[in-house]
Amino acid sequence: MGWFSRRSGGTERPGTLRSANTADLAHLRAFAISRHGVEAFIEPRTTVTEATLLLVAADGEWTRRRIPGPKAAEEFAREHGVPLYDPVSVGYPQRMREWTARRKAEEKAGD
């Protein structure tokens, strides 16, 4: 194997985008129903990544997973009663960055 090879264990060819699957959607559902004050942010498909849905809880905890597309994000938000935003228009919440910084500080303190 060369430097840039990777073993994914999947059937995908190198350079192909992985689509959202049931595990991605299940993870998003579990996050949305187990956290308080969740907001959703739809991130468009890029050349490297399919569309993703970013969920941010009231305390700043966040998760991101692939979704089938914008329509699926709208349906998810409606089904779970969470607001859906375009981060290009509104930006990402500061509490998300603060949560990430706290996690990094905790990991560093634990070393």
Image: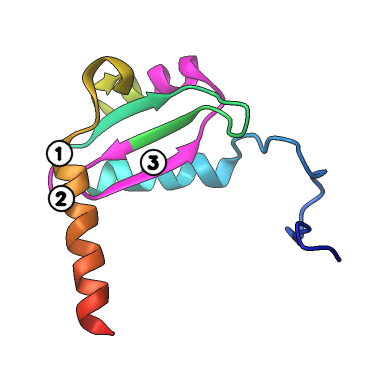
Which residue, given by chain and number where applicable, does mark 2 sit on? 98
Magenta residue check for 73: yes
In this figure, what is the number of numbered marks?
3
- Give the Cα separation between the discs numbered 1 and 2: 6 Å
> Residue 84 occupies which quadrant of the picture?
top left
**In the figure, 93 relative to 88: above or below?**
below
Q: Is residue 105 left or right of residue 2?
A: left
The amino acid type of the residue labelled 3 equals Arg
Between residue 67 and residue 110, name the one nearer to us: 110
**In the figure, 57 relative to 73: above or below?**
below
Q: Which residue is farthest right?
A: 1
Which residue, given by chain and number where applicable, does mark 1 sit on? 94
SS of the residue under disc 2: helix
Q: How is the image coloured?
A: rainbow
The amino acid type of the residue labelled 2 equals Glu
Question: Where is residue 72 drawn, in percent x and y?
Answer: 48, 21
- Give the Cα separation between the discs numbered 3 and 2: 23 Å
Which residue, given by chain and number where applicable, does mark 3 sit on? 29
- Give the Cα separation between the discs numbered 3 and 1: 23 Å
SS of the residue under disc 3: helix
Q: Which mark is residue 37?
A: none
Residues shaded magenta: 55-76
> Residue 111 occupies which quadrant of the picture?
bottom left
Q: Residue at x 24, y 25 (%)?
A: 91
